[in-house]
Amino acid sequence: MSGNSSGTEYIKMEVSKPTPDVWRFSSLDQACANMVLRGTWLFAGWPEVDKLKEGMGKLLDYYPYLSGRVKEDGGISLNNDGMPFTVIDKPGWRLEGLYRR
Protein backbone atom coordinates (compact mmCIF):
# COMPACT_ATOMS: atom_id res chain seq x y z
CA MET A 1 0.00 0.00 0.00
CA SER A 2 1.45 3.37 -0.87
CA GLY A 3 2.04 6.14 1.64
CA ASN A 4 -0.98 8.12 0.47
CA SER A 5 -3.44 5.25 0.25
CA SER A 6 -6.44 5.03 2.53
CA GLY A 7 -8.22 1.99 1.07
CA THR A 8 -9.30 -0.82 3.34
CA GLU A 9 -7.93 -4.31 2.76
CA TYR A 10 -9.19 -7.44 4.46
CA ILE A 11 -6.55 -9.60 6.10
CA LYS A 12 -7.45 -13.29 6.20
CA MET A 13 -6.12 -16.26 8.12
CA GLU A 14 -2.83 -17.40 6.69
CA VAL A 15 -3.48 -21.11 7.19
CA SER A 16 -7.10 -22.13 7.26
CA LYS A 17 -7.56 -24.65 10.08
CA PRO A 18 -10.61 -26.83 10.65
CA THR A 19 -13.00 -24.89 12.88
CA PRO A 20 -16.69 -25.15 13.71
CA ASP A 21 -18.97 -23.20 11.39
CA VAL A 22 -20.06 -20.79 14.12
CA TRP A 23 -18.46 -19.37 17.26
CA ARG A 24 -21.35 -19.12 19.74
CA PHE A 25 -21.56 -16.09 22.03
CA SER A 26 -21.27 -16.63 25.77
CA SER A 27 -23.59 -14.86 28.21
CA LEU A 28 -20.88 -12.23 28.74
CA ASP A 29 -20.51 -11.75 24.97
CA GLN A 30 -24.26 -11.20 24.67
CA ALA A 31 -24.30 -8.72 27.58
CA CYS A 32 -21.51 -6.68 25.93
CA ALA A 33 -22.85 -6.93 22.37
CA ASN A 34 -23.25 -3.15 22.00
CA MET A 35 -19.65 -2.45 22.99
CA VAL A 36 -17.46 -1.67 19.99
CA LEU A 37 -13.67 -1.85 20.26
CA ARG A 38 -11.46 -0.09 17.75
CA GLY A 39 -7.72 -0.06 17.49
CA THR A 40 -5.48 2.64 16.10
CA TRP A 41 -1.72 2.44 15.95
CA LEU A 42 0.39 5.56 15.46
CA PHE A 43 3.94 5.31 14.16
CA ALA A 44 6.62 8.01 14.10
CA GLY A 45 7.70 6.80 10.65
CA TRP A 46 6.19 4.69 7.89
CA PRO A 47 5.69 1.13 9.24
CA GLU A 48 6.60 -2.06 7.41
CA VAL A 49 3.04 -2.58 6.16
CA ASP A 50 3.67 -5.96 4.54
CA LYS A 51 5.11 -7.32 7.80
CA LEU A 52 2.11 -5.98 9.74
CA LYS A 53 -0.29 -7.69 7.34
CA GLU A 54 1.70 -10.93 7.51
CA GLY A 55 1.63 -10.82 11.31
CA MET A 56 -2.12 -10.16 11.34
CA GLY A 57 -2.67 -13.18 9.08
CA LYS A 58 -0.72 -15.37 11.50
CA LEU A 59 -2.62 -13.93 14.48
CA LEU A 60 -5.94 -14.77 12.84
CA ASP A 61 -4.87 -18.42 12.66
CA TYR A 62 -5.14 -18.44 16.48
CA TYR A 63 -8.24 -16.20 16.72
CA PRO A 64 -10.39 -17.12 13.69
CA TYR A 65 -13.47 -15.36 15.06
CA LEU A 66 -11.73 -12.01 14.42
CA SER A 67 -11.90 -12.82 10.70
CA GLY A 68 -15.55 -13.92 10.72
CA ARG A 69 -18.86 -12.07 10.56
CA VAL A 70 -21.46 -11.62 13.31
CA LYS A 71 -24.66 -13.57 12.78
CA GLU A 72 -28.03 -12.38 14.03
CA ASP A 73 -28.66 -15.60 15.94
CA GLY A 74 -25.94 -15.03 18.55
CA GLY A 75 -22.63 -16.07 17.07
CA ILE A 76 -19.88 -15.40 14.57
CA SER A 77 -19.75 -17.18 11.24
CA LEU A 78 -16.17 -18.49 10.94
CA ASN A 79 -16.00 -17.84 7.19
CA ASN A 80 -12.58 -16.05 7.06
CA ASP A 81 -14.05 -12.99 5.32
CA GLY A 82 -11.16 -11.03 6.78
CA MET A 83 -10.29 -8.33 9.29
CA PRO A 84 -10.36 -4.73 8.01
CA PHE A 85 -6.89 -3.19 7.70
CA THR A 86 -6.35 0.43 6.66
CA VAL A 87 -3.15 2.46 6.46
CA ILE A 88 -3.40 6.24 6.30
CA ASP A 89 -0.48 8.66 6.02
CA LYS A 90 -1.32 11.79 8.04
CA PRO A 91 2.02 13.38 9.01
CA GLY A 92 0.34 16.44 10.55
CA TRP A 93 -1.76 14.48 13.03
CA ARG A 94 -0.93 14.70 16.68
CA LEU A 95 -2.00 12.23 19.35
CA GLU A 96 -4.08 14.90 21.09
CA GLY A 97 -6.08 15.50 17.90
CA LEU A 98 -6.88 11.82 17.45
CA TYR A 99 -9.25 11.90 20.41
CA ARG A 100 -11.33 14.61 18.72
CA ARG A 101 -11.71 12.62 15.46
Image (cartoon, helix red, strand yellow):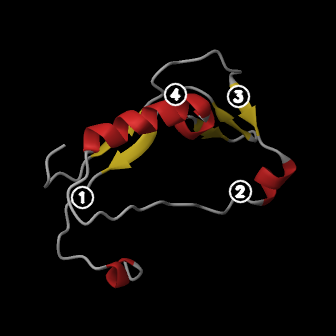
The numbered disc on residue 25 is none
Q: Which residue is the site of mark 2?
A: 33
Residue 78 lies left or right of residue 101; in this view the side is right
Residue type of the residue flagged with mark 1: Ile
The quarter of the rendered structure image containing the C terminus is: bottom left
Q: Which residue is the site of mark 1?
A: 88
Task: Give the alpha-carbon distance from disc 4 to disc 3, as whole Å.
Answer: 11 Å
The quarter of the rendered structure image containing the N terminus is: top left
Task: Give the alpha-carbon distance from disc 3 to disc 1, as whole Å.
Answer: 33 Å
Residue 10 lies left or right of residue 80; in this view the side is left
Residue depth check, mark 2 versus mark 1: number of the one nearer the observer: 1
For label 4, the SS is loop
Residue type of the residue flagged with mark 3: Val
Which circle's residue, 4 or 3, is located before the other in the chain? 3
Which circle's residue, 4 or 1, is located before the other in the chain? 4
Q: Which residue is the site of mark 3?
A: 22
For label 3, the SS is strand
